[in-house]
Amino acid sequence: MQTAPTAPRLSMLQVLVCGAFIVTLSMGIRHGFGLWLQPITQAQGWTRENFAFAIAIQNLAWGCFGIFAGMVADRFGAFRVIVGGALLYAAGLAGMALSSSVLVFTLTAGVLIGAAQAGTTYAVIYGIIGRQIDPAKRSWAMGVAAAAGSFGQFLMVPVEGFLISGLGWQQALLVLGVMVLLIAPLAFGLREPGFAGGATPKRDQTILQALREALKYPSFQLLMAGYFVCGFQVVFIGVHMPSYLKDQGLSPQVASYALALIGLFNVFGTYFAGVLGQKLAKRKILAFIYLARSVVIALFLIVPISPTSVYVFSAVMGLLWLSTVPVTNAAVAGIFGVAHLSMLSGFVFFSHQIGSFLGVWLGGLLYDRTGSYDIVWYIAIGLGIVAALVNLPVRESPILRAPAPQAA
């Protein structure tokens, strides 16, 4: 009996280089949005809650559109999704610069850029990695892609700070809008052979069957719960820490260096998390990361604040920042396979983005109500402990499915 020939794969180097550069640009730019909080709110006469709500909508839109971007990428290939995301990103940054009202700012910085990030970041890129790279190197490769996003933060946050100080916040956004278009030519390196000519690879499950199976599986639900906490913590810190540090009397340069340090150390954290994911139980790695975050945040609040304490906090938090990403996605791939990986990663990431929405929005809301970020810091600590506990029961072994009926 003959089996159908499998489609040729892209080279691992090509996938990693193109995917890494795309994630570097897309994630690098969005990690610096916190630097615009004070310039925009002061120039426009808006509150921090206005800005925070737009970024919260961005995270929610990213999660919502990520599900559908994953479905399209799994069915028709990721190339078109990535190119469309690049165009939306450029339009969103331009609209963000030219917005004259809170509503328009929310639609551009929130909805447009959120949709753009859905098509140019981890869920789509990880789907390509899952299909094109051998399972023995999958977790490692996902760690490399996540490390690229972290390097983007280290690279782009100081660049964005320099652009704001040198050109002003509006011109800086327009320059970034041109830069992000570089994603489109990079997408040509990720045109998967199995989707050539609009072909759709044969699958054992439909989209609805794969989704129904995953949503009923307890371990998938636990991974989603943990990822919710990840989103709450990192987006609250990433967006509000510059303003928190300024409220504490520290200079804006300290905030820029702090975010850059998070990005630099996250390069190492995500890479080693991917490496460890090939060797150790992923549930234990995730539990450790979430618990360690809570400990680090608690110590940061206890120690008297200074540039040194901020830099130490940023370095240690950077090691834990996105290290959940390769481990979580590798766990999903190991349990359910790679046929619908982009879509399932999109669903897990949607939970992450609900947490992101609440983290960034509550940060602005509670600051405006109380004049302090303390309550949100405490929530972040408590959620980290909960996430550590819910990841421990995750079962990582491949799900058992009834064999498909064979044709006579």
Image: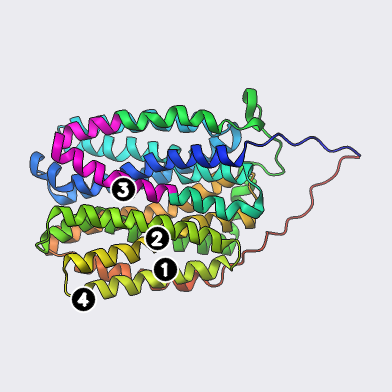
Q: How packed is label 2: few (under 14 Cα within 10 Å), some, or many (20 or more)?
A: many
Would you call the spot at circle 4 few (<14 residues within 10 Å), some (14-19), or many (20 or more)? few
Span of residues in magenta: 148-177
Quadrant, the N terminus: top right
Q: What type is the residue that disc 1 sits on?
A: Tyr
Could you tell me if the residues under marks 3 and 4 are in contact, i.e. CB atoms within 8 Å?
no
* Tag 2 residue: 230
Left or right? Give the position of 138 relative to 270.
right
> Element under label 3?
helix
Q: CA distance from mark 1 to mark 3?
A: 20 Å
Q: Which amino acid lies under the numbered mark 3 shown in the image of this protein? A: His
**Numbered circle sitting on residue 290:** 1
Q: Is residue 291 left or right of residue 18?
A: left
In this rendering, would 179 be left or right of 193?
left
Dot placed on the residue nearer the N-terminal end, 4 or 1: 1
Q: CA distance from mark 4 to mark 2?
A: 23 Å
| Front one among 355 and 248 | 248
Disc 2 on helix, strand or loop? helix
Structural distance between the alpha carbons of marks 3 and 2: 15 Å
